Image (cartoon, grey):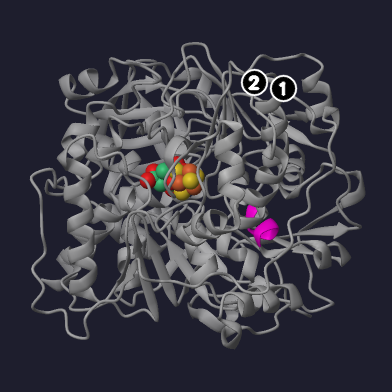
């Protein structure tokens, strides 16, 4: 039987386990990336491992999220990251060099290799045929130390692309179409592989837009074959020597298959507040939704090709008087090239506000919309409040639809414009200048690591208590995102190395009293619906609950990265065997898991855990899907505690 492309890469990197869907495998990681908002934690944890140097082929520390520097915290964190990178053999991508995912696929991604990144959009590099996975910082720290990355062997999904995009449809509309069909939980436990004759017409930046937003499906990763398009792109980046051809075997077997006729794809838009709330732009445009702001950029749509199309559409025109248009090119390479070729001038002349190359408004770092405002963005997530304005409505669109909207002043269909569809030619050579990537010294042992006062120690972890008892501190619904659990915005993001401070904001978008209540009760248990913890890889969404004494989350289902982060940090993610039991638990109920250590031990063999609700006199059964490795972590109080124990 033939293998899929990702099965081949996994086979070549397999360290432990068998490639049986759902079972834990451990794979070797060739490259890692971190960004600043998860990186400080990842490196604090790497330091705690006590190693001398990273063991990977390549590790890069990017700074792209915390760029506002309203006060000293972020600048201090940047210095910490730069010094820790030099100390341990990591390349340092300086602030201003661009968004980690954009820079990584331009300068470092290699087909057939594995990449683990402490950011959920790491799969962007799958556009070049790399097996690129997002994970929590601790998993990335372990991989930097040469340890395996463990995950459940994913199921395989094939999306066959036929035909060719037409008219105003663009790559963003392809992934929005996939989201419309599969939803934000449709990719959980799966890898999405793209194939078919339509690939020949999709450039690397277009493929990267698609793999990037595969994160919103909850997928482990998404991947394209490595073909002539990949070869030409890598050659144009001066990296032709790293190219290899890769594809699935013709007789590879997939668990699910979808076909998308590219000719039939039309411009789409995700309505507030979920990336899978997908509608056509044509239908939405008829509503004449007045727009206050348009932002173009983020790791989804900030390539040179995107910027060139945007500039062509803006050339000689002026944006609507009530719209603020914000453009953030994805990397220094992109910004440099549009500065030289005049596209930047076209944007500025039309009225755009230009940002430095970084995440910017995507993560609420500035450019918050007005009260009840409408913002149309080319980013990948429109969770409520993520823009920095809780009452704002954010719509997700392609760059083409974004420009049409900025010009018309309402969420507009580009077909309404009297202009030709712009075509972005792929340059034969990109401008190459890596002077913002600092190479580490051969021997970093003498490098002093700089720690500002904002860098606080990691929260202490306790071994699993027996019995595990606690009050239900909060009862939440479905699809709770990590932006709910640990909000990120301009005032909170600078505190990513200060968990005690962040914990004061844990789950506050759902209930402002949550942190105070959790502290007053000495911790307890969180109850939630399906797909709990979707979105970001931020392990702060597990660390802040640890800080508040949360010992377990009881839910109908979990998102992959968050579930792993909970286990790594010693919090039990308990899945209700009977989803209907959710109805019988209320906030304030006293729950107890008797013989918790014995029950966790037995869970490895599929044993169900019995959770008693003392308040209601009922019991319910829970699943704890863990490997023996994860059992030991949970008993010890998390991965670091477990490693410390095994060293003793
Ligand atoms: C995001 O898009 O939510 C982030 C900010 O990039 C996160 C990482 C973080 O929370 O620092 C992600 O996607 O993992
Ligand atoms: Fe940055 Fe936004 Fe991409 Fe996250 S999704 S890495 S915040 S640009």
Residue found at x 43% / y 53%: 119
Q: Where is residue 173 drawn, in percent x and y? A: 75, 43
> Local crowd at mark 1 within 10 Å, few (<14), some, or many (≥20)?
many
Q: Is 430 a magenta residue?
A: no
**Left or right of 70, for residue 401:** right
Residue that badge 1 annotates = 408
Residue 397 appearing in the image? yes
**Left or right of 391, for residue 305:** right
First of labels 2, 1 by sequence position = 2
Q: Where is residue 554 drawn, in percent x and y? A: 42, 33
Asked if disc 2 and disc 1 are in contact, CB closer than 8 Å, the reply is yes
Mark 1 lies on a secondary structure that is helix
Residue found at x 37% / y 16%: 587
Residue 72 to residue 603: above or below: above
Q: From the image, which quarter does the N terminus lie in?
A: bottom right
Q: Where is residue 121 drawn, in percent x and y? A: 51, 52
Disc 2 to disc 1, C-alpha distance: 6 Å
The image quadrant of residue 311 is: top right
Outermost residue to the bottom: 241
Which residue is more in the foreground, 190 or 292?
292
Q: From the image, which quarter does the C terminus lie in?
A: bottom left
> Local crowd at mark 2 within 10 Å, few (<14), some, or many (≥20)?
some
Q: Where is residue 399 drawn, in percent x and y? A: 67, 41
User: Which span of residues is magenta-colored?
Assistant: 205-209
Mark 2 lies on a secondary structure that is loop
**Numbered badge on residue 479:** none
Residue that badge 2 annotates = 320
The image quadrant of residue 240 is: bottom right
Residue 443 to residue 196: above or below: below
Residue found at x 57% / y 54%: 338
So how many labels did they put on this image? Answer: 2
Mostly what secondary structure, the magenta segment? helix
């Amino acid at each position: 039987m033939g293998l899929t492309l990702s099965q081949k890469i996994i086979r070549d990197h397999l360290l432990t386990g068998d490639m049986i869907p759902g079972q834990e495998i451990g794979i070797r990681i060739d490259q890692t990336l971190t960004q600043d908002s998860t990186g400080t934690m990842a490196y604090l944890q790497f330091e705690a491992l006590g190693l001398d140097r990273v063991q990977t082929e390549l590790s890069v520390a990017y700074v792209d999220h915390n760029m506002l520097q309203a006060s000293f915290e972020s600048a201090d964190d940047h210095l910490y990251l730069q010094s820790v990178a030099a100390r341990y053999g990591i390349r340092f991508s300086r602030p201003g060099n661009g968004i980690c995912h954009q820079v990584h696929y331009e300068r470092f991604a290699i087909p057939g290799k594995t990449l683990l990144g402490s950011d959920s959009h790491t799969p962007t590099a799958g556009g070049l045929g790399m097996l690129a996975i997002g994970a929590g910082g601790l998993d990335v720290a372990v991989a930097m130390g040469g340890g395996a990355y463990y995950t459940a062997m994913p199921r395989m999904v094939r999306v066959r692309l036929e035909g060719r995009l037409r008219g105003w449809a663009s790559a963003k509309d392809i992934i929005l179409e996939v989201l419309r069909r599969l939803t934000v939980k449709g990719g959980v436990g799966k890898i999405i592989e793209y194939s078919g004759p339509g690939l020949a017409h999709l450039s690397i930046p277009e493929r990267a837009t698609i793999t990037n937003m595969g994160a919103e499906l909850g997928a482990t990763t998404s991947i394209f074959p490595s073909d002539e398009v990949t070869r030409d792109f890598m050659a144009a980046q001066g990296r032709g020597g790293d190219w290899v051809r890769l594809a699935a075997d013709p007789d590879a077997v997939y668990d699910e298959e979808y076909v998308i006729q590219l000719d039939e794809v039309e411009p789409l838009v995700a309505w507030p507040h979920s990336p899978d709330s997908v509608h056509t732009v044509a239908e939405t445009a008829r509503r004449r939704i007045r727009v206050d702001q348009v932002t173009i950029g983020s790791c989804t749509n900030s390539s040179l090709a995107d910027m060139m199309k945007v500039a062509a559409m803006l050339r000689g025109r002026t944006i609507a008087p009530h719209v603020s248009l914000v453009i953030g090119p994805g990397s220094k390479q992109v910004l440099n090239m549009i500065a030289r070729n005049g596209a930047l001038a076209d944007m500025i002349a039309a009225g755009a506000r230009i940002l430095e190359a970084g995440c910017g408004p995507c993560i609420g770092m500035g450019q918050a919309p007005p009260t009840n405002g409408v913002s149309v963005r080319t980013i990948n997530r429109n969770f409520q409040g993520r823009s920095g304005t809780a009452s704002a409505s954010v719509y997700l669109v392609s760059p083409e639809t974004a420009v049409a909207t900025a010009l018309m002043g309402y969420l507009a269909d580009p077909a309404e414009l009297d202009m030709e569809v712009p075509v972005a030619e792929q340059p034969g050579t990109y401008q190459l200048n890596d002077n913002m990537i600092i190479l580490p010294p051969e021997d970093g042992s003498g490098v002093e690591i700089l720690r500002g006062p904002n860098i606080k120690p990691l929260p202490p972890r306790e071994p699993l208590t027996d019995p595990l008892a606690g009050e239900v501190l909060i009862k939440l619904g479905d699809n709770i995102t990590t932006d709910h659990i640990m909000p990120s915005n301009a005032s909170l993001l600078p505190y990513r190395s200060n968990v005690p401070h962040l914990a004061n904001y844990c789950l506050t978008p759902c209930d402002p009293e949550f942190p105070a209540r959790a502290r007053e009760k000495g911790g307890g248990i969180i109850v939630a619906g399906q797909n709990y913890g979707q979105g970001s890889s931020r392990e702060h969404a597990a660390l802040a609950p640890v800080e508040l004494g949360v010992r377990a989350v009881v839910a109908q289902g979990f998102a992959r990265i968050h579930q792993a982060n909970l286990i790594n940090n010693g919090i039990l993610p308990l899945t209700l065997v009977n989803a209907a039991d959710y109805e019988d638990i209320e906030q304030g109920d006293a729950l107890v898991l008797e013989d918790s250590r014995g029950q966790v031990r037995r869970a490895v063999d599929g044993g169900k855990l019995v959770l008693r609700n003392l308040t209601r006199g009922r019991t319910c059964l829970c699943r704890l899907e863990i490997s023996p490795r994860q059992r030991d972590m949970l008993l010890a109080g998390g991965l670091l505690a477990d490693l410390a124990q095994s060293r003793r």
